[in-house]
Image (cartoon, helix red, strand yellow):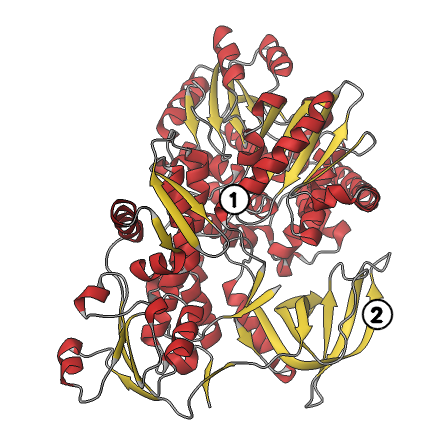
Amino acid sequence: MRWIESPHAASIFPGLSDLVSTALLRRGIQTEAEARAFLSPASYPPTPSSALPGMEAALERIASALRRREHLCVWGDFDVDGQTATAILVETLGQLGGQVSYHIPVRAKESHGVNLPVLKELIDHGAQLIVTCDTGISAHEAVRYARSRGVDMVITDHHDIGESLPEAAAVTNPKLLPHHHPLAHLPGAGVAYKLAEALGGPASNPETLLDLVALGTVADLAILRGETRYHVQRGLAQLRQTPRLGLRAMYELAEIRPENLTESHIGFTLGPRLNALGRLEDANPAVDLLTTHDPMRARVLAAHLEGLNAQRKLLCDQVTLAAEAQLRADPALLAAPVLILAHPTWPGGVVGIVAARLVERYGKPAILLTIGADGLTRGSARSIEGLHITEAIAAQKDLLRNYGGHPMAAGLGLETEKLPEFRRRLARTVEKMLAESQVQEAVLEVEGWLELGDLLLERAADIEQLAPFGPGNERLVLASRALRLESAAPVGKSGEHVRLTVTDAAGHSQTVLWWNGGSQELPQGVFDLAYTLRTSDYKGQKQVTVELADFRAEQQPQVEIRGRSLEVLDWRREAHPQALLAACDFPCQVWAEAEHKNQVNGRGRHELEPAETLVIWTTPPYGEVLREALERAAPRRVILVCQDPQQNFLERLAGVVKFVVNQRGGNARLAVLAAATGETLLAVRLGLVALSKQGQLTVELDEGGEVRLAWSQSAVQPAAAGGIQLQLEASLQETQAYRKFFKAAANPIEASGETII
């Protein structure tokens, strides 16, 4: 894994450390108001429920059902997100006086989605309105059947949308919103909560439901930005004082001190226990656990979850060992671009967990399948960043009975006899998608270097201001140099984890936890260590916990730039830099990109040559671009002008593409396109793929960086375009944050980690 060192800036946010301030900038937070809203839910302006598409129609139909005393049935899903979403709607509709029942599919019998035989049975027993949560966006056949019986369906879901929406009475799904919308990343529980909020439940204080929302959101690995982050922040506070008897019984059995509960307790303790119910048995009792007012019932259900969780752990370990054995026995399976393994005895409830383990270990997408006695094979897929696994699976839909999911995870079923063909075709599809998306080697972004003596409780508490952590707001990765391993001890019932003791040259020592490191090789000699730092609670006492992220052989901390000294002239606040440049009595090489290049007769990054003076006219898009430019020019003097490109990136890229296709025969180098747009290579790759998914362009890119472009009139691929657009927006946010840092830092060259010798 390649390490990338993030640049640091002096704090521009009052009261925050440089480390936290820089982390906020890297997350696209650019103003003091945005920083307050990110860090404190009291400063965040909630988005009205009416902003969700389809909400008005859903409210009208449900209000009508409540007035007419119709029998409502909430149809959920068996994971934690589905369980909590179901509990939210059942509790809300019940308190509003509704006649409400609920159904969560039994995984082993029904799989995901709205199962027609069960739907028929529910309607036969009197259901007059079906309200789905965390499911239903692809339930076209079920909606048509219900309508034929005179029963409406209201769909609330958050999964990817297909070519068309079901013809339901209402469909509300945040995937219908732009990616940057505050509600765009709501999980099923979040959508259910916004519906409950709009309905005025429970008892007109819907925030009492946020404990359930936080559970479902964190367990579903939702992106913690916008409203989704706000829900988890408020929900964690609610969980610490929840009156729900089922949750309090779970706390007691899991030995959780509620006042210290964090998102980690949901992810590693509460979530797995609730998930075990849906994976191994019937998840319907989870709704009872989350809503019961009977203390005895709460304790019985919580104790049952403890037993199932222990069983889940054992089954996961057994399936993992069996999967590894298959890979050892048949190297061709491991050589494929996607790992596809199957066995008749693997429990369907745990194959997804094991697939995720294989992805983490081998860095490839993985699918684990259970071969059924009924001639059907069912399973779960997990993916790597940059590969939309559900899109890859959908390309083989003619072979499948069913499928569905997210960019990073999916479920599927097919006839067993079609498995060999599915394996061959999916491998080709994944190989092509990986080539198109230009998925790069895994990188680890190190956000700060510390001495072991600096790993204090105060430092960890400072970082915890950024919590809750998760997708979209990962924990800060820090690092220390030149360490040695003093001791290592196994941790866990089977020694699957390791407790390391490391020391530095100054004599400081530190305990480091290495989760799932029991079978890995220990660091040797002198090494650099990357880790996360957090506060934890042990027997009521706050302490620092250091968790290993990666290690490498000791390396020199910074890149050397040729030249003995570097003079920096700062023109960033000059009103007329062009006049100053014209008045210079020494020759200057001007590094200017995008629209700036013609304005000042500049050169792109790929055109720079050795020069005494380098004028940085266009603000660099990222630290590595700056580093490469300084190495090319090897200047003794740098003049900082630092103006940002003004035109929208995709518009700028489209204009460059038009020129290349019409005037250059469609041939160009990726580096030239990056300079012409003033962006990173990654953003240009993603931008080209985005244009191709919109049906405008065909793109061929070889390993040497040569690009061949041609106009196209192919069909638009909305699901693929959406996934690429999300990655592109994240990349552009990184550029925006870096440019803000570069313009704010007192000496951005030095702050970017460049050493002048």
Splitting the image into 4 quarters, where does residue 101 fall?
top right
Percent of width and height locating residue 577: 17, 77
Query: Against 671, is 146 above or below?
Result: above
Seen from the viewer's position, the closer of residues 287 and 318 is 318
Q: Residue at x 31, y 70 (%)?
A: 619
Q: Residue under circle 2?
A: 489
Query: Against 622, is 501 above or below?
Result: below
Q: Secondary structure at mark 1?
A: helix
First in sequence: mark 1 vs mark 2: 1
Q: Quadrant location of the N terminus?
A: bottom right
Q: Residue furthest bottom?
A: 564
Is residue 611 at least partly visible in the picture? yes
Q: Residues within 10 Å of mark 1 (few under 14, many from 20)?
A: some
Separation of residues labelled 1 and 2 (CA atoms) = 44 Å
Percent of width and height locating residue 292: 66, 35
Label 2 amino acid? Ala
Label 1 amino acid? Thr
Percent of width and height locating residue 36: 39, 63
Q: Residues within 10 Å of mark 2 (few under 14, many from 20)?
A: few
Residue 556 lies left or right of residue 329; in this view the side is left
Q: Secondary structure at mark 2?
A: strand
Is residue 248 at least partly visible in the picture? no
Q: Residue at x 64, y 51 (%)?
A: 266
Q: Residue at x 16, y 82 (%)?
A: 580
Q: Residue under circle 1?
A: 208
